[in-house]
Image: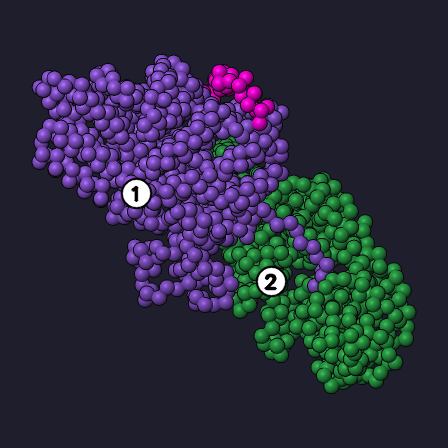
Chain colours: A purple, B green
């Protein structure tokens, strides 16, 4: 009746092809079948079962240690490697041979269907299993329905029965393509096929018994299995080799990696994953989230916004408004990352409101804490409403909330923030230590592995503030060597940059730069961290050039650093001070002073860290000293010293003392100056700051010479003082040598020449003078 | 350069018209239907001029100069309209097509107008029917165009004999269940133009029995096509004998490579239960043309009966690879799942087949079988009924209906259906046995006995392939025992004994079996009653030796021995 059937309608297609079963999984099932039939001798059971379980369980702990994605397709090579060496219960045959036989026994689609349906018989009957603990029934052992393998078998059979016929046929074809490479091995073992003259007939390749006798290019064969050749060429990328289930697991792994560690997956892995994803017709929605994270981390502003919206659009129909606040949260963080602070704040406000509406406590707490930190970091961008609220909803409130909702990470971070606040506000140091200790206790007892980084970095910065640079460096090194596994990449980068900076302070610039170069490239895949790292590198280079007197390069570097829009607050301070230093070295004192005044005002307004403010004050004092108006700076220095002492900011205190000593020298109070500095010299040396050392030593030398100058009568004492002065000058020379600061070295040599002059050491004087001239020239 | 003004777009209308016609035809020939539609639309929107001479296309046409007027157009205007209508039809816009050629007189145009209307009606009917086996499915919805078409056709056919119009008239009448007139119309159609295969195809549905076919032979012209028809009709009626085979052979001589003829031969072999040969032929066809889906559903039935599940899977694979959305493919896959006892899945596939083509007969019948397996008797009955409505000659549907009603214990009702099935296939012993069982339940032992006897003779009537020989014997012994027992009921023991003895005669060939055992024990009892103790003892002993019905036989042996001892005390 063909004539009248022209108006046929097409029925609805079945959704989601290739959901779960793949040829690889079929091979795994064959291996399990061998196991149940007790074909695997006892010593080989453990490796075989480990292999099987590895592919079945998405084990978080296992993943994180290896930091590699779960294997997508179970390749025959892996199976072969595992089983080819192991002897089986049948003598003369390895497990691999038995496995191959099982695979090649399936010689038609119906046989495959039978195989999958029979898998159910491997599961123990629940009623029977309860009565007696019989695990094996003569030849065969059973799996309980709830064991890992039992659950896998159940899922496999269920998915197979759900598959529409056409898809099951596709699976069969994929299976043929999958096992085809093992044909020679199989023929070797299977003598009945071996009498063929080496020509691979259709019967062998496709092993479909109904095609026996037909040549490979028979139209029927082409019609049925033409696609198999294509599949063989495409390998893993062929449709059906990797199931939707596997792909979703891979994507989840990627997302987890990116969120937890804050970085993108390495390039090679990304390419592999992309290839697998492209082979599929339908893409799970998580892929859009992965794209979004990729775009974000690589610094693609436009792209990441688009991807974010795309992802949430696709998931909107399944999740509706409940995820709205997460979308806003992501938007806000994204905008903050790219420096649009105002929009970020607005978005975050929305997030807070929506989270409150939907009673999503976790999101709400996270948003509030984020807002708090943001307000601290960028106080000028927060509108008054927020600022006022932040003052009210102080850290304690956040802590309480975090504790209530059991968000330990947040709680730990809150403690750290408290400590930071205490330090910045020149409050009790003891309290800061206490907070850090609390945070550390939480980290250890709750096992919050990725919070260790922040805590150790804060601790190391405390040590720096206390002037024990060695402990600071040790802290950072410890973190990088022992705790890198679970640490967010941000912390790792910060720690390494900090270590490099500390080394640079000792004057070992090359070493510091080398350390920076050796940083793991993978850590720098996120733009933000890359910028941070680059800033530190630039900063170190800038300092080096400043000290060397290479002003053109320094200027250039400075311009670059200043041009970078989004830098961390601590870097900004350093850069600003370097700028001032540049002016000082160029003898543009008025400009330097102006700059310093501006900075002081800004910091006053922003309530910046007390250390930075003190440093600005001391720089001012130094400028005045260089201008020859040291005494004018007395009050500022004293104030700085007092505050530094109260806040226990010891390096600043030492510098303040040095400046004070300088002032005293100007006031001709040499012995007092000397006593002042001499008493704290050991601690100053402990700071390992070459510049500070140099300054102090040169002041000491000045003091000594001054004191020598006072002693007009006592020749011996004079000589003593002058000798000590020379000693100091030598040491000072060495320190400045470390920094490569030729100008200061020239100055020191000048002083030395004059001292020698006074001491009537002509040769030494000439030598010193010559060195001085040489330094000035070169 | 000045832009061309609108008046510059001027062409010689004649050339333009010609070019467009040629272009439309060329596109249509290459199956570029949308392009053809556009060209035809433009062609028809040119300003109408005076009708020109016929057949500017005559020289280009591949059709021969004909006298029957089947290809001639009255004027060019009609021809243009025809092309436009055809292009609409090719893209399934039926109503539009019908409207364009409204009122045309030329053969092609007139036919297309009416046929397009008919198709539009069918399409609407399918859409209104919605779900298969739903409330709106079946005779509730009808093709609303049918009455209008009937009238029109009658008017048109009053003055001329157009074979295609006659064919359409026949179809319309058939849809309205007016078989006599349809028959006449179709016969007229084939007489006027024997190569109208569409008409032959419809004709085969009218012939209900072999007598009808033979009668039709008188009315039909002596032509090659008639032989084809004879073959087709005979095959559809399961009427297989030497003459049919010769017919096939003769036709194969003329058309050696015809897959259709091969399929027909295979189907004939299927009807006589020669499954292996049939399978071989179908295999050949499949290898020579892997993309052919016709008759594949019948092949799947053959494999189902032969219990060759893997092969059936293979065939399903082939069909699925060719086209997933053909009713034949869905039927094959449905059969496969039915063999695997996954009945829900097979029902899904049969329904899909029906969604694709509501008149696909085998799908209805098979759907009915599946419902029976799932014990959903009412749905089964409806499916079978739909099958019968599509084709009154489906033996299995009638048989299925009988069985379904039997399950529902409506035995008298079931009898009606069995009788109808019997009318189609008089020699099917299974059906007779089922009928006999019905009679038994209704307490009509005489009729039951008659039916059982027919069942027995039915076996003899079939050409027994070696595989089914033993089955024949199996059925035989069961039937014999049943007949014997029935005779016992009507108190005609002699006949009963006769049949039991007949049963025993089968023993040497069959070996010991339950039925033989039953027969023996019954006979033993009977002989004991009749005091033929010797014979009784012999039978009982045989039973005991054979190890069947051990307790009974032992008891009987002991009993008889006792009695013998009593009678002949030592």
Above or below, B255 relative to A260: below
Label 2 environment density (alpha carbons within 10 Å; few <14, some 14–19, many ≥20): some
Mark linked to residue A309? none
Q: Which residue is mark 1?
A: A550
Label 1 environment density (alpha carbons within 10 Å; few <14, some 14–19, many ≥20): some
Q: How many marks?
A: 2
Query: Regarding mark 2 in the picture, which secondary structure is present there?
Result: loop
Query: Regarding mark 1 in the picture, which secondary structure is present there?
Result: loop
Above or below, A120 relative to B15: above
Q: Which residues are magenta?
A: A383-412
Q: Which residue is mark 2?
A: B293
Of A273 and B505, nearer the camera is A273
The location of residue A747, given as percent across then percent down, is: 22, 34
- Residue B82: which quarter of the image? bottom right
The location of residue A432, given as percent across then percent down, is: 38, 17
Q: Residue at x 78, y 50 (%)?
A: B128
In the visual, does A427 lie left or right of B314?
left
The location of residue B286, given as percent across then percent down, is: 54, 65
Of A588 and B516, nearer the camera is A588
Above or below, A654 relative to B172: above
């Amino acid at each position: 009746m063909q004539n009248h059937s022209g108006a046929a309608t097409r029925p609805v297609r079945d959704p989601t092809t290739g959901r779960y079963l793949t040829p690889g999984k079929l091979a795994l099932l064959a291996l399990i079948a061998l196991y149940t039939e007790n074909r695997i001798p006892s010593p080989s059971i453990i490796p075989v079962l480990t292999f099987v379980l590895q592919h079945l369980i998405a084990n978080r702990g296992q993943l994180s240690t290896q930091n590699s994605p779960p294997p997508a397709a179970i390749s025959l090579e892996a199976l072969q490697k595992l089983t080819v060496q192991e002897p089986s219960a049948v003598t003369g045959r390895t497990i691999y041979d038995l496995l191959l036989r099982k695979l090649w026994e399936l010689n038609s689609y119906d046989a495959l269907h039978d195989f999958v349906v029979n898998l159910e018989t491997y599961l123990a009957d629940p009623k029977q299993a309860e009565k007696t603990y019989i695990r094996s029934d003569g030849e065969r052992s059973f799996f309980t329905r709830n064991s890992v393998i039992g659950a896998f078998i159940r899922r496999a059979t269920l998915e197979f029965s759900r598959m529409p016929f056409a898809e099951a046929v596709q699976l069969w074809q994929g299976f043929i393509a999958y096992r085809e490479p093992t044909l020679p091995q199989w023929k070797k073992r299977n003598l009945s096929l071996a009498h063929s003259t080496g020509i691979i007939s259709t019967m062998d390749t496709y092993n479909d018994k109904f095609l026996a006798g037909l040549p490979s290019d028979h139209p029927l064969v082409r019609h049925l299995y033409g696609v198999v050749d294509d599949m063989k060429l495409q390998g893993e990328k062929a449709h059906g080799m990797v199931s939707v289930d596997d792909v979703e697991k891979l994507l989840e792994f990627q997302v987890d990696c990116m969120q937890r560690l804050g970085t993108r997956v390495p390039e090679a892995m990304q390419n592999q994953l992309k290839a697998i994803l492209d082979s599929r017709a339908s893409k799970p929605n998580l892929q859009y989230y992965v794209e979004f994270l990729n775009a974000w981390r690589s610094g693609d502003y436009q792209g990441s916004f688009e991807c974010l919206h795309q992802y949430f659009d696709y998931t909107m129909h399944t999740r509706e408004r409940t995820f709205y606040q997460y979308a806003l949260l992501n938007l806000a963080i994204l905008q903050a990352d790219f420096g649009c602070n105002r929009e970020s704040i607005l978005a975050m406000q929305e997030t807070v409101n929506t989270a409150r509406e939907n009673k999503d406590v976790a999101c709400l707490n996270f948003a509030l804490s984020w807002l708090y930190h943001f307000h601290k970091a960028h106080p000028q961008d927060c509108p008054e409403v927020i600022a006022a609220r932040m003052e009210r909803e102080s850290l304690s409130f956040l802590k309480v909330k975090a504790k209530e909702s059991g968000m330990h990470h947040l709680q730990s971070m809150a403690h750290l923030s408290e400590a930071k606040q205490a330090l910045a506000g020149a409050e009790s140091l003891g309290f800061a230590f206490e907070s850090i200790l609390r945070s550390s206790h939480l980290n250890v007892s709750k096992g919050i592995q990725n919070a260790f980084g922040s805590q150790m970095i804060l601790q190391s910065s405390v040590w720096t503030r206390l002037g024990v640079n060695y402990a600071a460096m040790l802290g950072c090194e410890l973190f990088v060597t022992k705790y890198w596994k679970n640490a967010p990449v941000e912390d790792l980068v910060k720690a390494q940059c900090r270590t490099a900076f500390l080394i640079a302070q000792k004057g070992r610039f090359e070493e510091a730069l080398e350390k920076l170069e050796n940083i793991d490239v993978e850590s720098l895949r996120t733009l933000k961290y890359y910028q941070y790292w680059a800033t530190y590198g630039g900063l170190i280079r800038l300092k080096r050039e400043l000290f060397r007197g290479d002003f053109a390069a320094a200027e250039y570097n400075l311009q670059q650093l200043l041009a970078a829009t989004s830098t961390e607050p601590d870097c900004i301070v350093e850069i600003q001070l370097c700028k001032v230093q540049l002016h000082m070295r160029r003898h543009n004192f008025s400009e330097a002073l102006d700059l310093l005044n501006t900075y002081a005002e800004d910091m006053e307004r922003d309530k910046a860290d007390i250390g930075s403010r003190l440093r600005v004050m001391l720089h001012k004092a130094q400028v005045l000293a260089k201008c020859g108006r040291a005494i004018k700076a007395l009050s500022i220095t004293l104030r700085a010293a007092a505050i530094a002492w109260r806040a226990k900011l010891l390096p600043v205190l030492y510098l303040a003392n040095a400046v004070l000593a300088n002032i005293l020298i100007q006031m001709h109070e040499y012995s007092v100056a000397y006593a002042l500095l001499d008493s704290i010299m050991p601690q100053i040396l402990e700071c390992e700051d070459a510049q500070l050392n140099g300054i102090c030593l040169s002041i000491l030398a000045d003091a000594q010479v001054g004191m020598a100058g006072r002693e007009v009568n006592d020749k011996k004492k004079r000589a003593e003082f002058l000798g000590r002065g020379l000693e100091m000058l030598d040491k000072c020379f060495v320190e400045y040598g470390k920094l490569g600061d030729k100008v200061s070295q020239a100055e020191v040599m000048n002083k030395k020449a004059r001292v020698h002059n006074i001491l009537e050491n002509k040769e030494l004087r000439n030598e010193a003078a010559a060195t001085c001239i040489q330094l000035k020239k070169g | 350069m000045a832009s061309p003004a609108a008046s510059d777009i001027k062409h010689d209308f004649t050339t333009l018209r010609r070019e467009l016609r040629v272009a439309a035809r060329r596109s249509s020939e290459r199956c570029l239907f949308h392009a053809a539609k556009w060209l035809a639309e433009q062609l028809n929107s040119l300003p109408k001029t005076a009708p020109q001479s016929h057949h500017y296309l005559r020289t280009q046409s591949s059709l021969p100069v004909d006298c029957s007027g089947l290809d001639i157009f009255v004027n060019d205007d009609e021809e243009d309209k025809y092309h436009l209508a055809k292009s609409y039809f090719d893209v399934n816009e039926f109503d539009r097509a019908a409207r364009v050629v409204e009122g045309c007189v030329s053969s092609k145009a007139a036919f297309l107008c009416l046929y397009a209307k008919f198709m539009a009606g069918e399409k609407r009917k399918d859409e209104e029917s919605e779900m298969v086996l739903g409330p709106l499915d079946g005779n509730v919805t009808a093709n609303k165009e049918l009455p209008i078409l009937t009238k029109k056709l009658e008017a048109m056919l009053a003055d001329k004999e157009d074979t295609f119009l006659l064919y359409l008239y026949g179809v319309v009448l058939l849809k309205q269940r007016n078989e006599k007139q349809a028959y006449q119309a179709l016969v007229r159609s084939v007489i006027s133009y024997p190569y109208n295969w569409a008409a032959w195809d419809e004709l085969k549905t009218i012939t209900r029995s072999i007598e009808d076919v033979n009668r039709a032979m008188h009315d039909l012209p002596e032509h090659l096509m008639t032989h084809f028809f004879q073959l087709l009709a005979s095959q559809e009626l399961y009427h297989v004998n030497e003459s049919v085979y010769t017919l096939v052979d003769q036709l194969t001589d003329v058309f050696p490579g015809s897959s259709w003829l091969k399929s027909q031969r295979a189907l004939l072999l299927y009807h006589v239960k020669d499954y292996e040969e049939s399978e071989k032929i179908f295999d050949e066809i499949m290898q020579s043309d892997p993309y052919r889906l016709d008759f594949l559903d019948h092949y799947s039935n053959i494999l189902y009966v032969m219990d060759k599940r893997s092969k059936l899977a293979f065939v399903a694979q082939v069909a699925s690879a060719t086209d997933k959305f053909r009713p034949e493919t869905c039927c094959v896959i449905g059969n496969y799942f039915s063999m695997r006892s996954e009945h829900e899945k097979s029902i899904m596939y049969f329904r899909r087949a029906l969604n694709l083509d509501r008149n696909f007969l085998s799908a209805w019948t098979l759907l009915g079988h599946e419902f029976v397996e799932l014990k959903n008797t009412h749905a089964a009955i409806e499916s079978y009924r739909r099958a019968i409505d599509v084709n009154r000659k489906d033996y299995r549907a009638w048989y299925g209906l009988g069985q379904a009603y039997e399950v529902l214990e409506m035995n008298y009702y079931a009898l009606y259906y069995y009788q109808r099935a019997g009318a189609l296939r008089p020699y099917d012993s299974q059906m007779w046995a089922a009928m006999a069982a019905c009679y038994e339940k209704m307490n009509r032992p005489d009729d039951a006995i008659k039916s059982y006897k027919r069942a027995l003779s039915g076996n003899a009537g079939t050409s027994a392939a070696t595989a089914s020989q033993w089955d024949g014997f199996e059925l035989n012994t069961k039937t014999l025992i049943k007949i014997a027992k029935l005779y016992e009921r009507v108190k005609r023991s002699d006949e009963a004994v006769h049949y039991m003895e007949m049963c025993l005669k089968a023993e040497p060939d069959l070996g010991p079996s339950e039925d033989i055992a039953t027969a023996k024990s019954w006979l033993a009892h009977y002989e004991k009653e009749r005091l033929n103790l010797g014979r009784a003892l012999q039978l009982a002993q045989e039973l005991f030796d054979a190890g069947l019905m051990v307790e009974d036989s032992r008891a009987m042996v002991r009993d008889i021995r006792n009695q013998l001892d009593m009678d002949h005390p030592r």
